[in-house]
Image: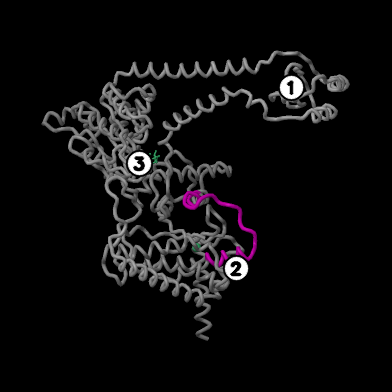
Amino acid sequence: MKNESQSTALTRQRSTAVRGTVVKGVMVGWMLIQSILMSTPAISQTRDSLSYSELLKKIDAGEVAKVEIDEAQRVAKVRLEGKTKDAPIDVQILDRNPELIERLRSRNVDFDSQPTSDNSLVLGLVANLLLVMLLIGGLLMILRRSSSSSSGPGQAMNFGKSRARFQMEAKTGVLFDDVAGIEEAKEELQEVVTFLKKPERFTAVGARIPKGVLLVGAPGTGKTLLAKAIAGEAGVPFFSISGSEFVEMFVGVGASRVRDLFKKAKENAPCIIFIDEIDAVGRQRGTGIGGGNDEREQTLNQLLTEMDGFEGNAGIIIIAATNRPDVLDSALLRPGRFDRQIIVDLPTYKGRLKILEVHARNKKLSDEISLDAVARRTPGFSGAELANLLNEAAILTARRRKDAITPLEIDDAIDRVIAGMERAPLMDSKRKRLIAYHEVGHAIVATLLKNHDPVQKVTLVPRGQALGITWFTPDEEQGLTSRSQILAQVTSALGGRAAEEIIFGDDEITTGASGDIQQVTSMVRQMVTRFGMSDLGNLALETSNDEVFLGRSLMPRSEYSEELAGKIDQQVQVIAQHCYTDACRLVRENRVLIDRLVDTLLDQETIEGDQFRKMVEEHRQNQSVAVGS
Ligand code: ADP
Ligand code: ZN
């Protein structure tokens, strides 16, 4: 029952970062587990057990395939029918076993009897020997590596050196044409291509070619793609590594990786070095929460040293990406290092259209699809999300065995990317009725308020966490939002709960509105503390709180007195209550219309925006006729 406004921030998970550490963790874990098992071999053999009498029963039942009798140890190793590949089950037997043998004979079970010597001691000895050898082997390996690494002290545990953790692409095959919608960034970077291709042009007049460019922007906005495009346009190799891969559990590994990377790059100059997530290594030194991090600082120092260590015209340009420039160590941003910063923004409507065009190139789209409409429906989407969207649509098309992607698949893909997987429709029930009223409550309040975005559709098909969803088409990005628009959003977000309460009564309201209420609280709170839209006046009382300043300083969360805090809470309450009263009034005044809309919704599962507005309009006309007559 989410009142899903489409600017919902989409989270993207990055999983590239931890790979290196995990492998090592697994190695260490593996050695430990192995050693415990091997030094106590008995443990692994007595998992299943049978008593003597159970064994006799099983033989009678014909469930036993094979028995080996070990007289010396008074153990029978039993293999059951159908499980002959499993380890045998040990059964304690008596001194002499005439009846066992008799039974085995009469049932024709394969058996043999051999007085073996007690070999468990030998086994244990072998296991322990193996363990010792393993340990010695491991030690030797470590020693060999540390003596072969020439890179000074602190390298004894250098596991990382031999395994290159950076990727090199001789040809990226990406061109500026493949990057769309971020024109300013592209223009600025055009110049870098010239630095790489014709450095003489700059050095001849005494210009110093920049060494480092910092790309700043949210994940998925195309920073990696841009860097690759520079390499592709200039026809130079592309080295890439992620900042988090520098930072390892062994001190010194990160620094040695930096050294390796630059060594390789120098051999291949001119080239591009791309460092993704540079904030993972480049945080301000000496202020880390929970103590400093020697390893990270060493790595960062090494990076700075390397950057200073070559001339600007050496033909290496380092491009780093981050979305947290505020936490970077100031030393990184000094002239001669990353002195150029380029912002890579989320694309605007026009940008999204261009990105969609780029990714539609290799896809079959039916003629009815208007990429323009898709671009309008997707504010807040990054380039990566748009690419993903078209890909999802293509997958759906293939699954439905169609020849080309139709608007239906695009629609489903957008819904899926924003709200999650579609789930089976709810069974008819009182609960479904309540959900229908809740969603119609959102939609009707939004439609009746003049400052609200139009309803795109209302649906009872559950998706992701939501049992029903009301979608709105956001108005084209005006950039600014007015107070009345925010109030309209708050009121329609409360429309769901208002409908629940008025139609079903105080006792029947549900937890389904919790998401709405959270959204409302956050919007109203920002009105009071950030936008100066309450009786408290134009005070900025809180900074945007979606960023935790880990690196530089710990911002005090609030910079106001207890007394003011109380007033803020009071204002939030007043505004929210006012909107709720409004929503309730609208629901009460339009009860007949709402009933009709709910019936239609239960019948159709989904009402499209146009149909919704038409029904509202028809009702209005009927009413005015009724009043007029
Ligand atoms: P970032 O490095 O900013 O996290 P990426 O460059 O890795 O983002 O983007 C991932 C993918 O998303 C790209 O490979 C590309 O397919 C698509 N993409 C992102 N931005 C754009 C863009 N501006 N133009 C075209 N495709 C884009
Ligand atoms: Zn809701």
In the image, is the residue at mark 3 within 8 Å of ligand 1 by its beta carbon?
A: yes
* Residue type highlighted by circle 1: Lys
Give percent across and percent down for residue 346: 34, 48
Residues at marks 3 and 1, CA–CA distance in whole angstroms: 64 Å
Can residue 416 be found in the magenta stretch? yes
Q: Earlier in the sequence, mark 3 or mark 1?
A: 1
Where is ligand 1, by quadrant?
top left
Residue 222 badge: 3
Left/right of residue 70 with respect to residue 296 in the rendered view: right
> Which secondary structure, mark 2?
helix
Residues at marks 2 and 1, CA–CA distance in whole angstroms: 71 Å
Left/right of residue 98 with respect to residue 220 in the rendered view: right
| Residue at numbered disc 2 | 599
Residue 71 visible in the shown view: yes
- Residue visible at 56% across and 43% down in the picture: 402
| Residue at numbered disc 1 | 77
> Which of 426 and 235 lies nearest the eye of the viewer?
426
* Residue type highlighted by circle 2: Asp
> Which of 86 and 419 lies nearest the eye of the viewer?
86
> Which secondary structure, mark 3?
loop
> Which secondary structure, mark 1?
strand
Quarter occupied by residue 234: top left
- Residue visible at 53% across and 78% down in the picture: 622
> Which of 44 and 147 lies nearest the eye of the viewer?
44
Magenta residue span:
413-439
Farthest bottom residue? 629
Quarter occupied by residue 376: bottom left
Q: Are marks 2 and 1 in contact (CB under 8 Å)?
A: no
- Residue visible at 49% across and 53% down in the picture: 419
